[in-house]
Image (cartoon, rainbow, N blue to C red):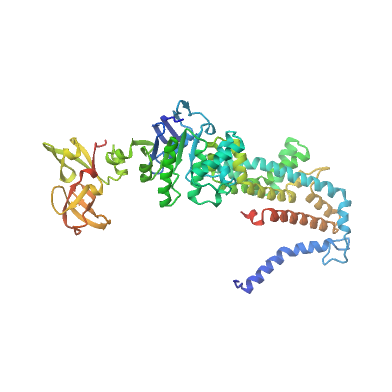
C-alpha cells in the first residue's frame, strides 16, 4: 500500500511568530523527500504538523485520500524515527518493537514473531531481551527503525535520525535506511540539516528557509542549477557576483560588475545569459591563473586544501574565494586573473 | 588504596554526629527511666511507659487518625501533584513561570500562617467537619513535595518517548499510564515517602484544624505533655523513630537510599 502525502498551503504560528507560511509540498507514493535547512527554518515544525503534534493555523494535510489535518496524532498511522531514538527505557528491545502491534491488538504470539522477524531484518536478532540502555547508539537507532517499520505505516518520517551517531556509522545507517525504505516502497519524509545526508538519501530535497521552501528538486538539479541565491549559497556557490551584460558578440557576452570589473562569458558554456544576472561561483568555479581571460584580482591569503590552493582575492567587484592549481603557487599581493569554470558556476536571475 | 583523612575532619564529623544524635539518645534513655518525670540519665529501668501508651485510648485513636491523614492526604496530593508536575514540565514553554511557584507556596508561607488561614477558610468559612478539614490541610501541606519531587523526575524524562508511543497508535491517556508513569516511578515513590513523613509529623497546621474528638498523634503528644510530664512522651517518640527507621529500612532494602536523593 503506497500512497502520497500532500501538504496544501499550511501555516503555523507559535504565539505571534509565524513559523510556516503557506507551505505546500507533495511526496509521491514510495518517494523519499528531505526537508533540508538550518535550525529554525521550519523543517521540524513541518514534520510535527504532519505527525499531529502541532496544529496548523490554516491549510490541509492529506495522506492518500485520508485527510489528516484534524485527526489526533495516535490515529494517523505514521512511523516516526527520532533523533534521540526515543526508545521506551522500561521495555525490552522486543517489547519496544512490538509496542505498535500491541496497540493494534495483535495477538501476543503473532506480534512477538513479527517483531522478532523485523529485528532480524535490521540485524539485531538475539538482542530482543535486552533493555535499550544496554545498546550502542547505532543499535538503538536500528531498534527505533524496526519499531517504526513493523507497523507497516503508509508514511515514514525521520527527524534528524543520524545526528547523534558518529560519522562512519552515519554513512552506513543512511545506506541501510535507504535500502529498507526502497524495499518496502514506503513514502517517506526526512528532516535533516546535513546537506550530504539529504542529497545522498533522497529522491527530492526541499531546501527551506524562514518557514518557506526555497526550492524543491532532485539533488542533481539543486547542486547544478539552484533557483535563487539562497539555494546557491546553501549548495556551495560561495561567490555571488551581480553583473550586467554590456556587449554581445555572437555567443560571447561581456559583463560588467560593480567597480568596473569585467568578465567575458560564452553562452555555449553558460546557456542563455540575460541582460542583468548574478554569476554564482564555487571556489572551484573561478580558477586562479597568472594570466588569461577572466576577472582581474589581487591575491590575499593562500591556504592549502590538499587538492588545490585556496586564495582570498580582492577584485573591484568585491572579495572572492577562488582556487588555483597546486603546480603554480602564487604569492600574496600578486596580480592574477580568475577564469570562470562553467561546470562550477551558475547563472541566477537577480532578486528584488 | 585508602585515602588519608585529616584528623581534624574526623573530629568535626564526630562532633556533628554527636550534635545530631545526642538528643535522640537522651530521649531513648528517658523512655526507659523508672521515674514519673522526664530525666536523663535514666534512673532504674522499666518498660511501663511503653505499656502506658497502649493504655491511653487517645494515643491509639490519634495514631489511627494520623495514619489515615498521612495515607489519604498523600494520595490526594499525588492525585493533584502528578498531573500538575506533568503539565508544568510538558508545557514549560507555554505555561506562565509563576505556576510552578504557586505549587510550592505552602512551604514558603510560614506554617502557622498557613494553618491559621486554612482554619479561617475551611473550618470557619466553609463550615466543613474536622476530618475533611484536616485532610484538605494535610493534602495542601504536602502538595509542594509531590509537585517538586515528581517534577524533578520528569525533568530528566524525554518527552519524545511519549510522542513515539502516540505515533505508534497509543492514545494520550494510555500513553501517560503505560509509558510516562513507569518511567517516573522512582520520583512518585520518593514523593510519597517525603509527603507521608511530613504529614505524619505535622503540628503547626494540624493544631489549627483539630477539634473536639478528633486529633492527630503529634497534637496528642503535646496535649499529654501539658498535663503529665512523664516518660510516656519519650516512649512515644521512640516508637515514632522506630517507624521512621522501618520505612527507611524498607526503602533501602527495595530501592536503595541513594534513590531518595536522585
Left or right: where does residue A271 sit relative to residue A119?
Answer: left
Quadrant of residue A98 within the rendered picture: top right
Q: Along the line of sight, which residue is nearer the eye, B39 or A95?
A: A95
Q: Along the line of sight, which residue is nearer the eye, B236 or B122?
A: B236
Can see residue A132? yes
Q: Along the line of sight, which residue is nearer the eye, A290 or B56?
A: A290
Q: Residue at x 65, y 71 (%)?
A: B10
Can see residue B96? no
Left or right: where does residue A26 sit relative to residue B57?
Answer: left
Image quadrant containing the N terminus of chain B: bottom right
Q: Residue at x 63, y 70 (%)?
A: B9
Q: Residue at x 69, y 50 (%)?
A: B193
Left or right: where does residue B170 sit relative to residue A298?
Answer: right
Quadrant of residue A228 within the rendered picture: top left
Q: Hey, which residue is sitting farthest top in the picture? A: A65
Q: Hey, which residue is sitting farthest left in the picture? A: A249
Q: Residue at x 50, y 52 (%)?
A: A136
Q: How many marks?
A: 0
Quadrant of residue A211 within the rendered picture: top left
Image quadrant containing the C terminus of chain B: bottom right
Q: Along the line of sight, which residue is nearer the eye, A100 or A124?
A: A124
For residue A324, above or below residue B124: below
User: Where residue A273 appears, x then y in whole percent?
Assistant: 18, 36
Left or right: where does residue A300 sit relative to residue B6?
Answer: left
User: Where residue A87 appears, x then y in whole percent?
Assistant: 54, 45
User: Where residue A182 appears, x then y in whole percent?
Assistant: 42, 38
Amino acid at each position: 500500500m503506497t500512497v502520497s502525502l500532500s501538504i496544501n498551503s499550511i501555516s503555523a504560528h507559535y504565539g505571534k511568530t509565524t513559523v510556516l507560511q503557506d507551505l505546500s509540498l507533495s511526496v509521491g507514493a514510495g518517494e523519499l523527500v528531505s526537508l533540508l535547512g538550518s535550525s529554525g527554518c521550519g523543517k521540524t515544525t513541518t514534520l510535527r504538523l504532519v505527525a499531529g503534534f502541532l496544529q496548523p493555523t490554516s491549510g490541509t494535510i492529506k495522506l492518500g485520500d485520508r485527510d489528516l489535518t484534524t485527526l489526533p496524532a495516535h490515529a494517523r498511522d505514521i512511523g516516526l524515527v527520532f533523533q534521540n531514538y526515543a526508545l521506551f527505557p522500561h521495555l525490552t528491545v522486543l517489547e519496544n518493537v512490538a509496542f505498535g502491534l500491541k496497540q493494534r491488538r495483535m495477538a501476543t504470539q503473532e506480534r512477538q514473531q513479527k517483531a522478532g522477524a523485523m529485528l532480524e531484518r535490521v540485524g539485531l536478532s538475539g538482542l530482543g531481551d535486552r533493555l535499550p540502555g544496554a545498546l550502542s547508539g547505532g543499535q538503538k537507532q536500528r531498534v527505533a527503525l524496526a519499531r517504526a517499520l513493523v507497523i507497516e505505516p503508509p508514511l515514514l518520517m525521520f527527524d534528524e535520525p543520524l545526528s547523534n551517531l558518529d560519522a562512519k556509522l552515519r554513512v552506513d545507517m543512511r545506506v541501510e535506511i535507504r535500502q529498507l525504505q526502497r524495499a518496502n516502497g514506503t513514502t517517506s519524509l526526512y528532516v535533516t540539516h546535513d546537506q550530504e545526508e539529504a542529497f545522498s538519501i533522497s529522491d527530492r530535497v526541499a531546501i527551506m528557509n524562514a518557514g518557506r521552501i526555497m526550492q524543491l528538486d532532485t539533488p542533481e538539479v539543486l547542486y547544478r542549477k539552484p533557483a535563487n541565491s539562497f539555494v546557491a549559497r546553501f549548495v556551495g556557490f560561495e561567490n555571488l557576483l551581480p553583473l550586467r551584460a554590456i556587449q554581445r558578440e555572437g555567443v560571447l557576452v561581456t559583463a560588467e560588475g560593480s567597480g568596473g570589473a569585467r568578465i567575458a562569458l560564452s553562452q555555449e558554456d553558460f546557456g542563455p545569459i540575460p541582460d542583468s544576472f548574478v554569476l554564482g561561483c564555487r571556489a572551484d568555479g573561478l580558477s586562479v591563473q597568472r594570466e588569461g581571460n577572466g576577472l582581474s584580482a589581487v591575491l590575499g591569503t593562500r591556504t592549502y586544501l590538499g587538492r588545490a590552493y585556496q586564495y582570498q582575492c580582492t577584485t573591484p567587484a568585491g572579495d572572492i574565494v577562488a582556487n588555483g592549481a597546486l603546480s603554480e603557487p602564487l604569492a600574496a599581493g600578486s596580480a592574477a586573473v580568475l577564469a570562470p569554470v562553467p561546470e562550477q558556476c551558475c547563472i541566477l536571475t537577480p532578486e528584488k | 588504596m585508602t585515602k588519608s583523612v585529616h584528623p581534624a575532619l574526623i573530629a568535626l564529623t564526630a562532633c556533628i554526629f554527636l550534635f545530631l544524635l545526642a538528643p535522640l539518645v537522651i530521649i531513648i534513655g528517658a523512655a526507659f527511666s523508672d521515674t514519673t518525670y522526664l530525666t536523663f540519665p535514666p534512673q532504674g529501668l522499666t518498660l511501663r511507659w511503653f505499656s502506658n501508651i497502649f493504655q491511653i485510648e487517645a494515643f491509639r485513636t490519634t495514631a489511627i487518625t494520623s495514619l489515615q491523614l498521612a495515607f489519604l492526604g498523600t494520595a490526594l496530593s499525588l492525585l493533584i501533584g502528578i498531573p500538575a508536575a506533568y503539565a508544568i514540565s510538558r508545557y514549560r514553554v507555554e505555561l506562565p513561570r509563576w505556576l510552578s511557584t504557586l505549587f510550592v507556596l505552602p512551604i514558603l508561607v510560614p506554617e502557622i500562617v498557613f494553618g491559621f488561614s486554612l482554619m479561617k477558610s475551611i473550618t470557619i468559612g466553609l463550615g466543613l467537619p474536622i476530618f475533611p478539614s484536616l485532610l484538605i490541610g494535610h493534602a495542601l501541606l504536602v502538595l509542594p513535595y509531590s509537585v517538586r519531587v515528581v517534577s524533578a523526575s520528569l525533568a530528566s524524562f524525554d518527552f519524545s518517548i511519549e510522542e513515539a508511543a502516540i505515533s505508534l497508535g497509543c492514545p494520550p491517556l494510555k500513553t501517560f499510564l503505560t509509558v510516562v508513569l513507569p518511567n517516573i516511578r522512582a520520583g512518585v515513590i520518593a514523593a510519597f515517602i517525603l509527603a507521608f513523613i511530613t504529614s505524619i509529623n505535622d503540628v503547626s497546621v494540624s493544631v489549627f484544624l483539630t477539634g473536639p474528638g478528633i486529633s492527630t498523634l503529634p497534637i496528642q503528644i503535646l496535649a499529654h505533655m501539658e498535663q503529665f510530664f512523664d516518660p510516656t512522651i519519650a516512649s512515644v517518640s521512640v516508637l515514632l523513630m522506630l517507624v521512621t527507621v522501618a520505612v527507611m529500612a524498607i526503602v533501602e532494602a527495595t530501592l536503595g537510599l541513594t534513590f531518595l536523593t536522585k
